[in-house]
Image (cartoon, rainbow, N blue to C red):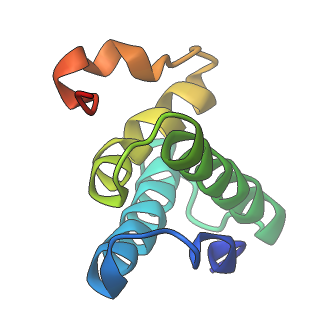
Amino acid sequence: MHDFNRLDHLQGGSEAKANLNRAITDAIRRSFDRCGMRNPTNAEITDRARFCVDKALELYNDLGWTVVKVAGHIETALQCHLAGIDWQPEQVGDFWRVQE
């Protein structure tokens, strides 16, 4: 799918990265299902994929989230984005943060 090669450098093993790719693909598909879009355009799919990949990289690189954690929250991030809600990852809870 679109832009997924940008996720190749993430740590976490091939299975974790495959799960993240699947989570993004499923999030995009369900986002179209929820709004009743049966034939989304390639541009609409690309926009949502680009958002998800950008957000995954932000969560991974900037916040230090694991690939597994990113996969578990990417659909919520996309839903909020589409609804015009500013989703803040900090709302997930401090127990997710790596303790130093």
Residue drawn 61% across the image and 32% down it: 82
Q: Quadrant of the N terminus?
A: bottom right
Residue drawn 71% across the image and 72% down it: 3
Q: Position of residue 50 (x, y in %)?
A: 72, 57
**Residue that extends furthest to the left in the rendered view of this protein:** 95
Q: Quadrant of the C terminus?
A: top left
Q: Is residue 62 above or below residue 18?
A: above
Q: Is residue 84 above or below residue 11?
A: above
Query: Would residue 65 appear left or right of 43 to someone viewing this image?
Result: left
Residue drawn 51% across the image and 26% down it: 80
Q: Position of residue 73 (x, y in %)?
A: 34, 41
Query: Would residue 72 appear left or right of 9 to someone viewing this image?
Result: left
Quadrant hosting residue 75? top left
Q: Nearer the viewer, residue 100 or 53?
A: 100
Q: Position of residue 57 (x, y in %)?
A: 60, 52
**Residue that extends furthest to the front in the rendered view of this protein:** 100
Query: Would residue 100 appear left or right of 17 to someone viewing this image?
Result: left
Q: Position of residue 18 (x, y in %)?
A: 37, 80
Q: Nearer the viewer, residue 87 or 41?
A: 87
Q: Is residue 57 above or below residue 78?
A: below
**Residue that extends furthest to the right in the rendered view of this protein:** 43
Residue drawn 43% across the image and 46% down it: 74
